[in-house]
Image (cartoon, helix red, strand yellow):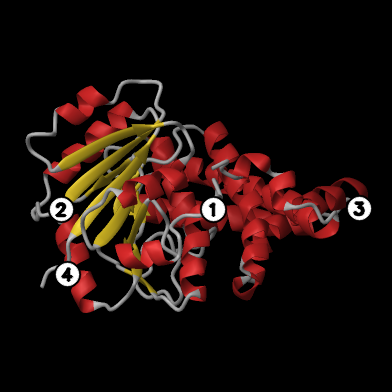
């Protein structure tokens, strides 16, 4: 018996992105699924966009007061009628065999939840492609978010994530966290004895941020969230989580060495790292301009995430602040 699927999209304002996502869902080879759009208090009218697809997609539209993506996804899941909940971000595009491959993998790979990769679409601009590279590169995230085919203890991310509805309800859905709510859910699933899997043929095209400033703020927030997650799930703490902070501190130490000791050994290591990122990005993207921008986005990612992680670790571990006190905007108010 084939699994049944409800696609749940929590959205705030992104009208143009919503049209592109729904258009890609309408192009699916397997059209046996429902779409649930949860308008999280948007300031623009999304109804006209939804109306364009109501006659060609089984789509439900709900509008609610703003609460952030996690609680909006929970809202949508309660209104889903199918066995599997599949969460995608509003700024993604899916390939035409997305639903087909999800169902195929569910039947082939036993699991309670799954996730897939994200990548850059050929129509994305150069900056989007550079940011996509840095978020999926072996030199930053280890390549796990990009195209790795075998991942043990894979943490599905909410831009491309599926969970059995009964399992989702069993653990209470997404938590009150605004940032990092998806790895929080993955680790909660593990702690309750449920399993996750990586499906290597359901990648989505993820636009992410469209400029370096917004990208920096986003990954800074991710960095702040990680020590909070470490407190909530100490069993799954990894030393590699601190690598961006060590990268940042090492760079500062390199500048100090160069200025006061008149030596450039540490900075030369960063020069080699920069060269390797540029060469690798050139090979992966086949575009020197993207590769040059990817070097910038890689440093932004490492520095911003590293600073966020370090700040959060000091506040929570050294100063013993509660997460809700240190980062009130990281949590929903139910």
Contact (Cβ within 8 Å) of mark 2 with mark 4: no
Q: Quadrant of the C terminus?
A: top right
- Residue 203 in sight from this viewpoint: no
Q: Position of residue 109 (x, y in %)?
A: 26, 77
Name which of mark 1 and mark 2 comes first in the sequence: 2
Gap in Å between the C-alphas at discs 4 and 1?
29 Å
Q: Position of residue 280 (x, y in %)?
A: 45, 57
User: Circle 2 sits on which residue?
Assistant: 33
Of helix, strand and loop, which one carries label 1? loop
How crowded pointer 3 is (Cα within 10 Å; few <14, some 14-19, many 20+) is rated as few
Task: Please tell me whether residue 73 is drawn above or below residue 318 in the rendered image.
Answer: above
Name which of mark 2 and mark 4 comes first in the sequence: 2
Q: Quadrant of the N terminus?
A: bottom left
Identity of the residue drawn at 9% across and 55% down:
30
Contact (Cβ within 8 Å) of mark 2 with mark 3: no
User: Circle 1 sits on which residue?
Assistant: 180
Name which of mark 1 and mark 3 comes first in the sequence: 1
Q: Which mark is residue 104?
A: 4
């Amino acid at each position: 018996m084939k699994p049944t699927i409800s696609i749940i999209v929590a959205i705030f304002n992104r009208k143009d992105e919503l049209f592109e996502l729904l258009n890609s869902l309408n192009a699916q080879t397997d059209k046996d699924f429902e779409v649930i759009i949860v308008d999280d208090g948007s300031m623009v009218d999304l109804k006209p966009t939804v109306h364009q697809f109501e006659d060609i997609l089984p789509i439900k539209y709900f509008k609610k007061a703003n609460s952030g993506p996690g609680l909006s996804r929970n809202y949508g899941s309660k209104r889903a009628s199918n066995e599997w909940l599949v969460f995608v971000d509003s700024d993604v595009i899916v390939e035409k065999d997305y639903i087909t491959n999800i169902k195929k993998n569910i039947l082939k790979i036993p699991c309670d939840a799954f996730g897939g990769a994200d990548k850059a679409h050929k129509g994305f601009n150069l900056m989007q492609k550079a940011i996509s590279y840095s978020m999926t590169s072996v030199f930053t995230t280890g390549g796990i978010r990009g195209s790795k085919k075998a991942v043990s203890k894979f943490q599905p991310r909410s831009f491309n994530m599926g969970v059995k509805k009964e399992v989702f309800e069993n653990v209470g859905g997404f938590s009150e966290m605004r940032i990092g709510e998806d790895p929080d859910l993955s680790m909660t699933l593990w702690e309750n004895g449920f399993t996750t899997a990586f499906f290597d043929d359901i990648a989505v095209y993820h636009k992410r941020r469209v400029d370096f400033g917004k990208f920096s703020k986003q990954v800074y927030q991710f960095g702040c969230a990680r020590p909070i997650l470490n407190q909530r799930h100490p069993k799954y703490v990894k030393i590699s989580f601190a690598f961006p902070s060590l990268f940042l501190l090492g760079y500062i130490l390199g500048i100090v060495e160069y200025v006061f000791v008149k030596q450039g050994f540490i900075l030369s290591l960063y020069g080699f790292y920069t060269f390797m990122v540029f060469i690798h990005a050139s090979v992966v993207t086949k575009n020197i301009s993207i590769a040059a921008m990817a070097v910038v986005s890689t440093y932004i990612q490492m520095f911003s995430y590293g600073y966020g992680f370090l700040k959060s670790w000091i506040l929570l571990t050294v100063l013993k602040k509660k997460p809700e006190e240190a980062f009130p905007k990281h949590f929903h108010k139910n």
